[in-house]
Structures are given as structure tokens and as C-alpha cells.
Amino acid sequence: MSKEQNNDQEMQVTEHLEELRSRIIWTIAAFVLFFILGFVFVEEIYNYFVSNVGYELTVLGPFDILWIYITLATFVGIIGTLPVMTLQIWLFVKPALSSKEQKVTLSYIPAMFFLFIGGLAFGYFLIEPLIFHFLVNLGEGMFETMFTVEKYFRFLIRVTLPFAVFFEIPVFVMFLTSLGIVHPNFLKKSRKYAYFILVIIGTMISPPDFILQLVVAAPLIILYEIAITCSVIVQRKRDKKMEQFYQSEEGK
């Protein structure tokens, strides 16, 4: 390899690192902006989440007040930064994609954001009330019920956030399938292992009640099946495209 080729490779690596650095800076800047926004409106966000609790939340010290401010502001920062981060990732890999792949993968960005919000809403409005009321009723008549702000919001995040992440699975699998990294046959062969892992996750999220564990695990399994279906659709389109490409090459 000549000296000029080495210099060209070093320049390309340097350009990629500069590009990566720029994308990371934009993502961090977006997070800081949304974090500040969440910090400003933390009282309104807090009042919304505790409006249906039915219990007076308490704090055990001044640091608990700071904890809730930082936690809620961070939550807003993550939600607001998600589309910005996915856009920056897409801009980073864009030069390596064809024009058609660029259009297809760009559509994943809003899909990922709305699925994340949908997962949060599913966990908050459907799963969290079931688990919360089950646990409260479990100790009814035995204890004087008192909740701290920190304990309640830790519980809320633990129940809702996993669903927000798992709702991303279909889009994430579609993206990997379009790049040829994941094949639907692999997902089908791994189904029983995936079910086992998802059931374990369901038992970790939910209390030790068999019915509730099924209620939590069932949506995760359904999401996995949706991911397989999405992967099959993307793979068929990819195979058809490759077949057309080879036919055009043979015709030359």
C-alpha cells in the first residue's frame, strides 16, 4: 500500500470521527435543551402523574425534592431527544445507503418516536394501574399505607419504561432486516428462547401473581410476533429487489 493510500485512509477515518463527534454534540445539545424544558415545567408534570394516585406522597428529606426534579427532567430529556438522536444516527449512516434505502430508513425515525410514546402510554394507562392496585390491595388492613415520592416514581418508571423500549422492537427488527443483519428465519427459530426471556422479563416487572405476569408477558410476546411479521415483509421486498438486480445483471 502506497503512502498516498495510507494518507487517504487516515483522512477518511478522521472525517468519520469528526462526523461522529458532530452527531454526538447535536444529540447532547438536544438532551440539555429538553432537560431544561422539563426542569422548568416539572411542577405541571409532577401534578399530572400524581393526580390519580389517591394517596398523599411524602418526601423524607430535601434531596428527595431534588431527585424528583432531576428524574422528571431527565425523562423529558430522553423522550425529546429520541427523534433527534435517531435522526443523527441516520445522517451518520446516510452516505453508505442508496437513495431508496435513505427514504425507507428515514421513515423509521417518526415510527420509533411514536412507538416509544405508545409504549409509555400502554404501560402507564393499562399495566401500571393493574399492578399498583394489586399491590395496594394486597396489604389493605395490614399496614398504614404511605408512599414517598421517590418510591412511587421508581415504581412508575420500572413498570412503564420497559414497554416503551419493547414497543421499539418491530421497527428495530425491520431496520436490521432491511440491512441484511437479521433474517426472519432466525427470529422464528429463536421463538421459544425469546418467549422464555420475555416471560422472565414479565415476571421481573410484575408482582408475584400468575395472572398479572401473563398480562404483562402477553404484550411482549405479541410484539415479538409483530416483529417477525414485519421482518418477513421487509425480507420479501429485499429478496425481490435482489432478484431484479441479478436479472438485470444477467441481461447485460
Image: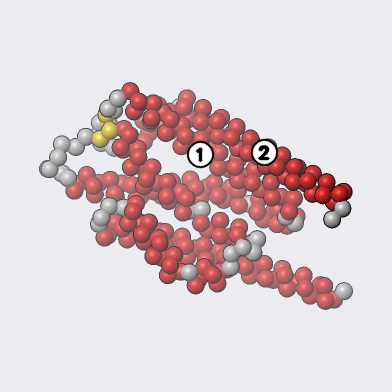
Q: Position of residue 33 (x, y in %)?
A: 56, 30
Query: From this viewpoint, is residue 125 visible?
Result: no
Q: Amino acid at mark 2?
A: Arg
SS at badge 2: helix
Q: Residues within 10 Å of mark 2 (few under 14, many from 20)?
A: few
Q: How is the image coloured?
A: secondary structure
Query: Callout 1 environment at 10 Å: few (<14), some (14 to 19), or many (20+)?
Result: some
Q: Position of residue 156 (x, y in %)?
A: 35, 42
- Sequence order check: which comes first, mark 2 or mark 1? 2
Quarter of the image that includes the N terminus: bottom right
In the image, 244: left or right of 172?
Answer: right
Q: Is residue 72 visible?
A: yes
Residue 179, picture quadrant: bottom right
Mark 2 or mark 1: which is in front? 2
Task: Give how far apart the Cα atoms at labels 2 and 1 are.
Answer: 19 Å
* In the image, farthest residue toward the top: 62
Question: What percent of the width, then of the height, locates residue 218?
Answer: 37, 61
Q: Is residue 82 above or below residue 228?
A: above
Identify residue for label 1.
78
- Residue at image x 19%, y 46%? 137
Question: What residue is shown with label 2?
Answer: 21
Q: Secondary structure at mark 1?
A: helix
Q: Amino acid at mark 1?
A: Ile
Hey, which residue is sitting farthest left in the picture? 141
Query: Which residue is depicted at the point 38% across and 30% down?
Result: 68
Left or right of residue 30: residue 11: right
Q: Quadrant of residue 230?
A: bottom right
* Residue at 60% across, 40% down: 84
Quadrant of the snapshot with the C terminus: bottom right
In the visual, does 152 lie left or right of 166? left
> Which of the two residues, 13 or 142, is positioned nearer the viewer here?
13
* Residue 251 location (% of width, % of height): 85, 76
